[in-house]
Image (cartoon, coloured by chain):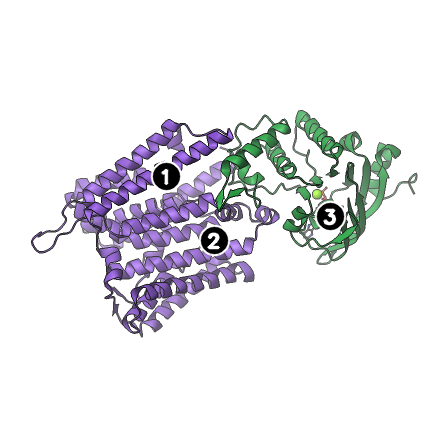
Amino acid sequence: MIATLKRSPALPAILGLVVLCAVFSAMRPAFFTPVNFANLLQQGAATTVIAMGLVFVLLLGEIDLSAGFASGVCAAILAVTLDQMSFPWYLSVGAAIATGVVIGFLLGFLVAKIGIPSFVVTLAAFLAFQGVALLLLEEGRNVSVRAPIILAIANKSMHPWIGWAFGATAVAAFAAVQLWSWYRRRAKGVTAVPLRLTALKVGALAVLVIVTVSILNQERSFNVRITSLKGVPIVVPIVVALLVLWTFILRRTAYGRHLYAVGGNREAARRAGINVDRIRISAFVICSAMAAVGGIIAASRGNSVDPNTGGSNVLLYAVGAAVIGGTSLFGGKGRVLDAVLGGLVVAVIDNGMSLLNYSSGIKFVVTGTVLLLAAGVDALSRKRNALGG
Amino acid sequence: MLEVRGINKSFGPVHVLRDVALTVRSGEVTALVGDNGAGKSTLVKCIGGIYPIDNGEILVDGKPVHIHSPRDAAGLGIEIVYQDLALCDNLDIVQNMFLGRERRRGIVLDEPSMEHLAEQTLASLSIRTVSSVRQAVASLSGGQRQTVAIAKAVLWNSRLVILDEPTAALGVAQTAQVLELVRRLADNGLAVVLISHNMNDVFAVSDRIAALYLGQMVAQVKTTEVTHAQVVELITSGKSGTIA
Ligand SMILES: Nc1ncnc2c1ncn2[C@@H]1O[C@H](COP(=O)(O)OP(=O)(O)OP(=O)(O)O)[C@@H](O)[C@H]1O
Ligand SMILES: [Mg+2]
């Protein structure tokens, strides 16, 4: 049991989270309050979603430096179609995500078919998308987002009741999947994980869900007579749904398997008959499409879109989230869960340091250092493996 | 079963294969020998669809076929263990063995049945040194990796198995096992091509010997009709006074 835990790639990020939360709570009691907890989740959601997409590109040993501004461009498309063309919200969301898909296809095509290194392609795109966002927003206008459903995504919470229902469903589904896989393995006569361990995992998830939901269901409004504010933020089920979807695709489908194979040994994948170019293009498509989703969340959170949406630290925070969570920059190793855990770490650092009134300068330095630290751990563990340690 | 005729292959200015012809029969082990750089691996990769051939013909059961990709080769029942193994270090043994041909139920991977089959195959090759089929390939020794690569090739109901120096990294006992397996595959009616630099191995299991010298096929003979010394001469000088 202890050994299984120790081998878990999620361990450093979880430990980091616990330590960070303890330190910030001790230094600033306001950190450990339901209000701040909800804030933190809503602030970190966009970065986390972009990081989830980046995992796919990082798995191939590639990088997408343009994911931040791609999210900005898609957010601009959302805002402009909503505001100037009066699209219904779902069409605008569709347009934003479609834009992400097209961007990803373009990047992937240039990398896989033309053979330009992804670093160069996406660095060029980084600059170009910044320009596209400016053009879309007509030299820097700030376009506000008024569609209630879009605004709800990153600002509103679910009824406490629905929060519980959602949590219960998640735990039940997780337990069902684990049991089913255990049963199938037993039926085939291959070694299955002991049921005790499965029960422990389900139990741990249940505890996590109960604690989270009960904290978030507390009243967060400063004045209940004006407005009541409680419940699990709506972004949480969105992020969880994306996590489940992409984890399923990576771990349970042939496509996901092939993605890992291409990241591990491209030539071996080719010899196994895998269409390597298609896999590489698809990873960029997923990355940019997720950047679009991240952009939509950011637009919702900010109530508006300006040319800086998706700019400044967004990309670095997203790459940092994936790497801190345990995704390797060398390809072949990583999970979507890494992006979520790393995204939480980044959000906690950002939020905690703001509460401590540190300037942006110090925040950037600290986050940069944490990213370097994570990348260093990644590089060292790779070196140790290569030396057979 | 397989026949190649007049294959030419150049890498830029380097003419690696010159009008190579080779016939491989079912139920026989054909040893492909030649010095380092003679073009053995290149020939194998052409047959496996890794490299396109410049010209020439490949026939399977007497019919001309076009092999443009590894998938085409697999479709024709050709399995190859490459000299550079071609395994993904980040995947485990089962994942590597089924790579590109995963078993599914609907869209979901059928892990238990793949694991079961992998275990069976490894057991049938009497491979006992691997502790778990869920071990990452990165953690295996050179010889273990080689056995995994071989197991991967025999897992599929193939008709032709080509092994490029399969015993190069193996210990004495494992080598004997692989040679025994090679023999067993041929006895079961498969066509087997074995590339090796070890004359003892070649003479121990092969029915025929094909010798490549600087990209040219200089002889294809029955193993029983030649001596060690003659084969060595073919490899090193491309001719042997006693064989036409
Ligand atoms: N991808 C390539 N590009 C250019 N030249 C190549 C390539 N692959 C092989 N060659 C050349 O082709 C020749 C034959 O190589 P090949 O690997 O087929 O030899 P081999 O007979 O398998 O040798 P060994 O016994 O050392 O494995 C060599 O001279 C090599 O330099
Ligand atoms: Mg070779």
Res A10 label: 1
Badge 3 marks a residue whose secondary structure is: helix
Residue B184 appears at what percent x and percent y?
72, 30
Image quadrant assignment for residue A3: top left
Check the image and report above or below for B55 versus B113.
below
Mark 2 Cα within 10 Å, few/some/many (few <14, many 20+)? Answer: many
Is label 2 or label 3 in front? 3
Residue A2 appears at what percent x and percent y?
36, 28
Res A196 label: none
- Residue type, numbered disc 1: Ala
Residue B105 appears at what percent x and percent y?
50, 43
Badge 2 marks a residue whose secondary structure is: loop
**Which residue is nearer to you in this view: A119 or A55?**
A55
Cβ of mark 3 under 8 A from ligand 1: yes
Structural distance between the alpha carbons of marks 2 and 3: 32 Å
Res A62 label: 2
Is label 1 or label 2 in front? 1
Q: Kindly indicate which chain is depicted in green in the rendered structure.
A: B
Image point 7% across, 53% down: which residue? A225
- Residue type, numbered disc 2: Glu
- Whether residue A225 is visible here, answered yes or no, is yes
Which residue in the rendered view is the most extreme toward the left?
A225
Residue A149 appears at what percent x and percent y?
25, 61
Give left or right: position of B201 versus B106.
right
Q: Earlier in the sequence, mark 1 or mark 2?
A: 1
Check the image and report above or below for A306 versus B52.
below
- Residue type, numbered disc 3: Leu
Image quadrant assignment for residue A173: top left
Task: Give the chain letter at badge 3.
Answer: B
Provide the residue designation for mark 3.
B43
Of the chain colours in the picture, the one used for chain A is purple
Image quadrant assignment for residue A46: bottom left
